[in-house]
Image (cartoon, rainbow, N blue to C red):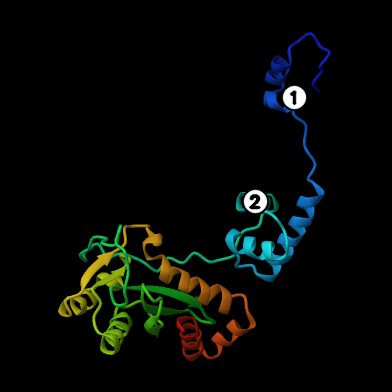
Amino acid sequence: MIDREHELPLAAQCRLLGIARGCAYYGPVPVSAADLRLMRRIDELHLAFPYFGSRRLLVKLREDGFEVGRRHLVTLMRRMGIEALYRKPRTSQPNCQHRIYPYLLKDVAIERPDQVWAADITYIPMARGFGYRVAIIDVFSRKVLAHRLSNTMTADFCVAALQEALAHFGPPEIFNTDQGAQFTDADFTDTLAAHGITISMDGKGRWIDNVFIERLWRSVKYEDAYFSDRGRLFQFDRGRRFSVIVDGISR
């Protein structure tokens, strides 16, 4: 459609055709043989580890001898339509009547155990309904201090996990959570206040402020529940099986 011999300039021809002028100067470049081999291996790894993102795929590829950077890997993954498979739950529903505490961990160096604890809730879909799991971790050591399973999103199972952690390990200096209604509930915050614990809460939509426990849930759910044979056992032995998985990661 573009006639390079025509007296009408290329820019005008492109404008009349409604296409970008760059299309007249640059032709499509075929995918190189090296990229085709790399994309084949990416596809194989994605089938074997569908929960792997670009960072973990990059490690695997380099172990296989591929010299590739993360930016190029991300480009190829987008071209192939590949991304890590994961669910995006929303268990943190705020209650506008509860008090929201400020986030206190910005620029704070966490250098010792029991300096900062964190808590979060996740869910696992079951044959009927969902199972909700709360865990409390020590941010410095990443140790899971307590966890509870519930079939409802009330605050009582969160309070029970908190009381267990306090009974076994004593109070931390700071306790950080998101703004979910279970953690802003008076029963939960009053328990923290009674032990002289400073309360910190993530900003709205700031999942990265609680990234360590978020990463714990990702490992538990997408590596041991959703995409593995062991995860199928969770449907038949819900509470105990999930506890074993969490304990295994905490050690």
Res. 50 mark:
none
Dot 1 alpha-carbon crowd within 10 angstroms: few under 14, some 14 to 19, many 20 or more:
some
The residue identified by callout 1 is 24
Q: Which of 172 and 128 is in front in this view?
A: 172
Q: Is residue 225 visible?
A: no
Dot 2: element: helix
Screen quadrant of the N terminus: top right
For mark 1, give the secondary structure: helix
Identity of the amino acid at label 1?
Ala
Judge from the rendering whether residue 125 lies leftward or rightward of residue 210; answer left or right: right
x and y, in percent, of residue 113 in the image: 32, 77
Residue 241 lies left or right of residue 26; in this view the side is left
* In the image, residue 4 above or below residue 180: above
Residue 170 in picture, x, y percent from top left: 25, 84
Which is more N-terminal, label 2 or label 1?
A: 1
Task: Choose top left, top right, bottom left or bottom right for residue 209.
Answer: bottom left
Q: What's under tag 2, amino acid-wise? A: Arg
Number of numbered discs present? 2
What separation in Å lies between label 1 and label 2 (alpha carbons)? 25 Å
At horizontal 47% and vertical 83% (from top left) the residue drawn is 246
Residue at the image point whose x is 81% and y is 11% from the top: 6
In which image quadrant can residue 167 be found? bottom left
Q: Is 76 left or right of 169, judged from the image as shown?
A: right
**Residue for point 38% across, 84% down:** 148
Residue 159's x, y, as percent? Answer: 28, 82
Q: Nearer the viewer, residue 206 or 65?
A: 65
Please provide percent x and percent y for residue 176. Answer: 30, 69
Image mark for residue 78: 2
Res 163 visible: yes
